[in-house]
Amino acid sequence: MSAADHFDYDFAMWLDSEAIFVAPGEIRDIFEGHMRNPIVWRSRMSFQDREKFLMSKAATTLGRSINSFGNQLWLLESLQWIIEKPIWNDMVSSIEMAHGGNFWDIWIENSYPFELLVYYLHIIARKMETVNSIFSNYRILETERELIRFGLDSALDRFLIDGDIKMLVSGAPDIHKWWDDRIKNGDAINNTETSYS
């Protein structure tokens, strides 16, 4: 997180340790797809006390209440995240203004919340209260609704990690088999650009 604050960049990508690429592609495609169509993926899967605690601490760090967003909100719906430096800077300034103190001190006082929860919650909050295009360009999509919309509701449970924190995982074994089958059938798999329009 200190790297996100310290270095000068436009966009950065954070990968979770469980993130894996299941097909050949270029990182550039991920960034270009994000720039054209930035999305915050949210969920209604905050059922456990730990998840509720994490989301509540993220909101408190921003100087807000989780009740403004819904108490089942969960924002760790991915294993990769694109960070935009102008948004990061706005988040740091907003946190310091909300608490009247130093960002790092506030972070520590709030039990070191997951930086990505705070970052994406900040985007949602600012999207509601400003017309600044850096926030208004983002779409907030609910994972469950999108799966249902594309007819994948029956497969939802198959893509969940079996654990206390229910997270949808793009690296699930079924996805690997799907890619292997596509390769065997000779399907074109080199286009890794995504479009959710």
Image (cartoon, rainbow, N blue to C red):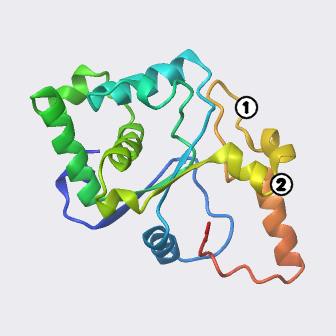
Q: Residue at x 79, y 43 (%)?
A: 156
Q: Is residue 172 visible?
A: no
Above-or-below relation of 184 to 95? below
Above-or-below relation of 197 to 65? below
Query: In the rendering, which numbered label is found on residue 162?
Result: 1
* Rendering coords of residue 179 (x, y %): 79, 67
Q: Is residue 171 left or right of residue 9?
A: right
Identify the element where label 1 is drawn.
loop
Point out the residue furthest to the top here. 49
Q: Residue at x 41, y 63 (%)?
A: 137
Q: Residue at x 31, y 45 (%)?
A: 129
Q: CA distance from mark 1 to mark 2?
A: 22 Å
* Rendering coords of residue 81 (x, y %): 46, 54
Q: Is residue 36 left or right of residue 62?
A: right
Above-or-below relation of 30 to 161? below
- Which amino acid type is marked by label 2? Gly
Task: Tell which of 69 and 154 is nearer to you.
Answer: 69
Which is more N-terminal, label 2 or label 1? Answer: 2
Q: Is residue 72 left or right of residue 176?
A: left
Task: Tell which of 70 and 9 is nearer to you.
Answer: 70
Q: Which residue is mark 2?
A: 151
Pointer 2 local density, CA inside 10 Å: few below 14, some 14–19, many at least 20: few
- Which amino acid type is marked by label 1? Asp
Q: Is residue 96 left or right of residue 183?
A: left
